[in-house]
């Protein structure tokens, strides 16, 4: 095992452990932790099996395994960030709709109070 593989195994195990701890503490929701756990598991698998990395290097027609590893890790985390962007966009849309509903309710309440006072 190379030093790079050992380091990546340690990083992936720390990532998986950190996600599990944060799920247990309820700092991250389970549905959002799945993509991080998948990323940690994929990183662990790629770094644990050097044969898989060699196969990917040949399949992608790259010359160096570290470049393949960087490409794989980058793609994994790009996927995670894309998924989180979708979640953030959805939350923003929900927040705008909620603010509009609150504004409508505040208008109705104030109109109701003005109507009562004028009577």
Image: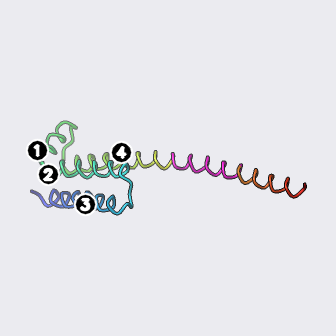
Of mark 3 and mark 2, the one earlier in the sequence is: 3
Q: Where 64 falls versus 18 (above or below)? A: above
Which numbered tag is attached to residue 51?
Answer: 1
**3 in magenta:** no
- Looking at the rendering, the stretch of residues picked out in magenta corresponds to 90-104
Image-based side of 44 in relation to 38, left or right: left
Picture residue at 22% right of the left edge, 38% below the top: 60
Point out residue 117 in the picture as x, y percentages from the top left corner: 87, 58
Task: Give the CA distance from mark 3 to mark 2.
Answer: 17 Å
Front: mark 3 or 4: 3
| In contact (CB < 8 Å): disc 3 and disc 2 | no
* Colour setting: rainbow
Q: Quadrant of residue 21?
A: bottom left
N-term-proximal mark, 3 vs 1: 3
Residue 79 is tagged as 4
Picture coordinates of residue 52, whole percent (x, y):
14, 43
Distance, label 4 to label 1, CA atoms, is 24 Å
Tell me how far mark 2 sits from mark 1, CA to CA.
9 Å
Q: Does the CB distance between marks 4 and 2 fall below 8 Å?
A: no
**Residue 13 percent across, percent down from the top left:** 21, 59
Q: Nearer the viewer, mark 2 or mark 1?
A: 2
Nearer-the-camera pick, 25 or 39: 25
Please tell me how crowded label 4 is: few (under 14), some (14-19), or many (20+) other residues with Cα within 10 Å.
some
Q: Nearer the viewer, residue 117 or 52?
A: 117
Disc number lying in front (3 or 1): 3
Q: Is residue 93 on the magenta stretch? A: yes
Q: Earlier in the sequence, mark 4 or mark 2?
A: 2
Are dots 3 and 4 in contact, CB under 8 Å? Answer: no
Residue identifier under label 2: 48
The residue at which mark 3 appears reads as 17
Q: Which residue corresponds to the image point at 75% horizontal and 54% vertical from the top-left? A: 109
Helix, strand or loop for disc 3: helix
């Amino acid at each position: 095992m190379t030093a790079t593989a050992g380091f990546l195994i340690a990083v992936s195990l720390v990532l998986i452990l950190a996600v599990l701890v944060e799920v247990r503490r309820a700092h991250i929701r389970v549905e959002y932790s799945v993509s991080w756990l998948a990323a940690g598991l994929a990183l662990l698998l790629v770094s644990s099996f050097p044969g898989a990395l060699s196969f990917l290097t040949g399949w992608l027609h790259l010359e160096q395994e570290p470049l393949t590893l960087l490409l794989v890790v980058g793609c994994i985390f790009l996927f995670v960030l894309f998924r989180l962007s979708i979640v953030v966009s959805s939350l923003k849309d929900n927040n705008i709709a909620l603010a509009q509903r609150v504004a409508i309710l505040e208008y109705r309440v104030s109109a109701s109070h003005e109507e009562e006072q004028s009577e």
